[in-house]
Image (spheres, rainbow, N blue to C red):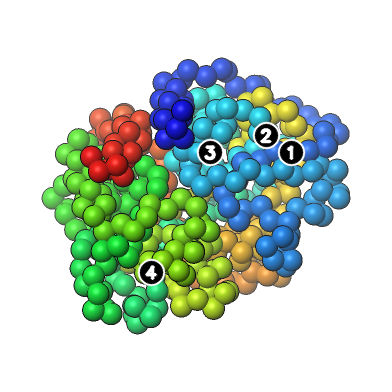
Amino acid sequence: MTTLKKILISTTILAFGGAPMASAQVASLGAGEGQVDIVAWPGYIERGETDAAYDWVTKFEAATGCMVNVKTANTSDEMVALMNEGGFDLVTASGDASLRLVAGKRVQPINTDLIPSWGKVDARLKDAPWFTVDGVHYGVPYQWGPNVLMYNTDVFKEAPTSWSVVFEEQTLPDGQSNKGRIQAYDGPIHIADAAQYLMFHKPELGITSPYELNEDQYKAALDLLRQQRTLVNRYWHDAFIQMDDFKNEGVVASGSWPFQVNILQSEGQKIASTIPEEGATGWADTTMMQADAAHPNCAYMWMEHTLSSNLQSDLSVWFGSNPVVPEACTDGSGLQTAEGCTANGLDNFEKIRFWTTPVSGCASQGECVPYYRWVSDYIGVIGGR
């Protein structure tokens, strides 16, 4: 079975509630079980192997006896599929995965009384709707940030002002077409990026949320993505392959994460990023616990550890994200500074449209195209249909 078919099947199962009931909330903690198994985004859990300055695993292992095992995933759909298969304790889920995991009974409620640092969490995130359901918390906030437009500064002497450079065929400032020189994200949630672009340029469509689309709005977004397909060099989902494409394959512009931007800049590459006039989608990630986690004590120890100011500070520098513990920007516990948090978009929280799982019954207009359609139709777009 192909990965795309697995994703479609697991997404459909979760959307319609064909999963077992979640475990009851943990009431108290005991000794660690010796390990914790985590599904995470690339760059989110570092033990100094890429850069010795960034290691928030080694000391945790020494202090708790819980060995940290990480499986990286490149898309939210991959994370959902892995959690659906089981065998993991935790996942760093973005908002387009978190509610699917809750609805599918794949994650369990979190007892915040067992998280001593819960009080330090940014008040804007404590009860965020992408992991809080009926007042129950299904995770611990981890990091947040925007999806940025990454570009080659040899081609763009000034930052692009519009996402049109990746959606519409045009001549770039170096006199060459953008055709074959741009990329798009290999995940159905990219439909929201197209919808956000249309919100700005075609207000007559009446889109108020890029995650809540009626049939006409959805068709317009798919049409834009089919147009984009004629320009795309590669649909990326592996951050490191995308970086290689910018270095060696002539790619000059793409939606990306600050993680790639930071690494490429550290290597001396002529790369920068911006948030164009249409704004940006973004991610607010949550550490969530498998419904039948085999190592719950170590999992709770790790969730508490993730809220340490030092980890939040260093991770936000490494990934180019924002800490969920605001004091990590200014308390000097790690490498982050107030200026660095501002550069990462700390003050733009209200301007970011955070990834959210599309559902059929939506707040803005009653009936919207549900996520399982996004999955199957985006596969079709990539396949030329």
Q: Distance between the residues labelled 3 and 4?
A: 30 Å
Mark nearer the N terminus (2 vs 1): 1
Q: Hey, what amino acid is under mark 3?
A: Met
357 to 105, vertically: above or below = below
**Residue 287 visible, this orientation:** no
Contact, mark 2 vs mark 1 (Cβ under 8 Å): yes
180 to 88, vertically: above or below = below
Of marks 2 and 4, the one in the foreground: 4
Q: Give the percent coordinates (x, y) of residue 67.
A: 79, 43
Q: Hey, what amino acid is under mark 1?
A: Val
Give the labeled residue for mark 2: 89
201 to 385, vertically: above or below = below
Give the labeled residue for mark 3: 79
Q: Distance between the residues labelled 2 and 1?
A: 6 Å
Q: Distance between the residues labelled 1 and 3?
A: 16 Å
Q: Which residue is drawn at 22% across and 36% down?
A: 214
> How would you rate the neighbour count of disc 2 (Cα within 10 Å): few for under 14, some for 14-19, many for 20 or more?
many
Q: Residue 36 carries which label?
A: 1
SS at circle 4: loop
Give the labeled residue for mark 4: 250
Which is nearer the eye, 65 or 21? 65
Residue 349 left/right relative to 371: right
Q: Quadrant of the C terminus?
A: top left
Q: Hey, what amino acid is under mark 4?
A: Gly
Q: Hey, what amino acid is under mark 2?
A: Asp
Mark nearer the N terminus (4 vs 1): 1
373 to 70, vertically: above or below = above
Residue 224 left/right relative to 141: left
> How would you rate the neighbour count of disc 1 (Cα within 10 Å): few for under 14, some for 14-19, many for 20 or more?
many
Residue 160 left/right relative to 321: left
Mark nearer the N terminus (1 vs 3): 1
Q: Distance between the residues labelled 3 and 2?
A: 12 Å
